[in-house]
Amino acid sequence: MARNLDAKCRQCRREGEKLFLKGEKCFTDKCSVERRAYAPGQHGQKSGQRLSGYGTQLREKQKIRRIYGVLERQFRKVFGDAERKKGQTGENLLKLLEARLDTVAYRMGFGVSRAEARQVVRHNGVLINGRRVDIPSYNVRPGDVIQLLESTRGQLRTKAALEAAESRGFPAWLEVDVKAGKGIFKSYPAREDLPPSINEGLVVELYSR
């Protein structure tokens, strides 16, 4: 299966902001974005580099792909689905990305990062409405109950991830029972509930060229 093998911290530095790809490290002063707030590579510290309109749109698309851990072909498919739905394409895109099972599992604290939550899903550690699902891109729907298997919930790293997520608080569109290791996907998130640093309009402009 294809996957992005670039170093996680390098990806964050390339986008110039925290993408929260390394779990708890991103919340400490060890975060590479705070220690080296410039792009990687020998020319990373050069200032005054200006991007064209296309370059700005491309960088935003790459940033969103990296945040959600989605490859180009998958991203285009989700964008196509967003175009076919009623409403604004950009907002639909973010809602569909947030409804992916790996992202929902991450938001619920089943892993300290999306990559770890994706691994939990792939290893048959998650139930949806009582049925095992091992497809990270599975589209969770409002009302679905997502639950960890008892054996997975008992693992030390899973417990630590749940506790860390609980301490930071859960999104408004999720209802999570940390002790039971399960939660409900109540609804798709509203745009105001998602990071304002994401400019989905640039992606729509890019694909409209």
Image (spheres, rainbow, N blue to C red):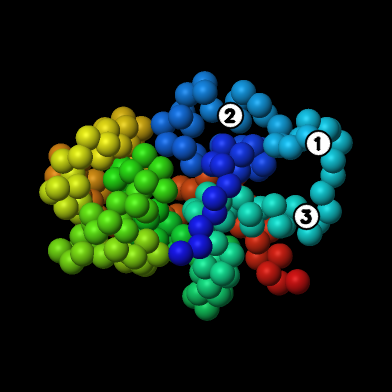
Give the image location of residue 192, x and y in percent. Answer: 50, 49
Q: Circle 2 — which element?
A: helix
| Residue 47 vertical position relative to residue 19 in the rendered view, above or below | above
Which residue is depicted at the point 56% across and 42% down?
7
Q: Is residue 1 above or below residue 66?
A: below
Q: Is residue 159 visible?
A: no
Q: Quadrant of residue 37?
A: top right
Q: Residues within 10 Å of mark 1 (few under 14, many from 20)?
A: few
Quarter of the figure with residue 50: top right
Q: Quadrant of the C terminus?
A: bottom right
Which residue carries the number 1 mark? Answer: 43
Q: Is residue 203 left or right of residue 138?
A: right
- Amino acid identity at mark 1: His
* Residue closer to the observer: 155 or 93: 155
Judge left or right: residue 192 versus residue 197: left
Image point (34%, 52%), residue name:
119
- Confirm or deny contact between disc 2 and disc 3 (CB under 8 A): no
Within 10 Å of the Cα at label 2, are there few (<14), some (14-19), or many (20+) other Cα atoms? some
The amino acid sitting under disc 3 is Gly
Q: Is label 1 in a helix, a strand or a loop?
A: loop
**Foreground disc of the pair 2, 3:** 2
Q: Residue furthest bottom?
A: 84
Inter-mark Cα distance, 2 to 1: 17 Å
The residue most toward the top is 29
Instruction: Looking at the image, tell me whether mark 2 or mark 1 is earlier in sequence order.
Output: 2
- Frontmost of labels 1 and 3 is 1
Q: Which is nearer the eye, 41 or 22?
A: 41
Residue 55's disc is 3
Q: Secondary structure at mark 3?
A: helix
Which residue is labeled 2 in the image?
32
Mark 2 → mark 3, Cα distance in angstroms:
24 Å
Q: Residue at x 83, y 53 (%)?
A: 52
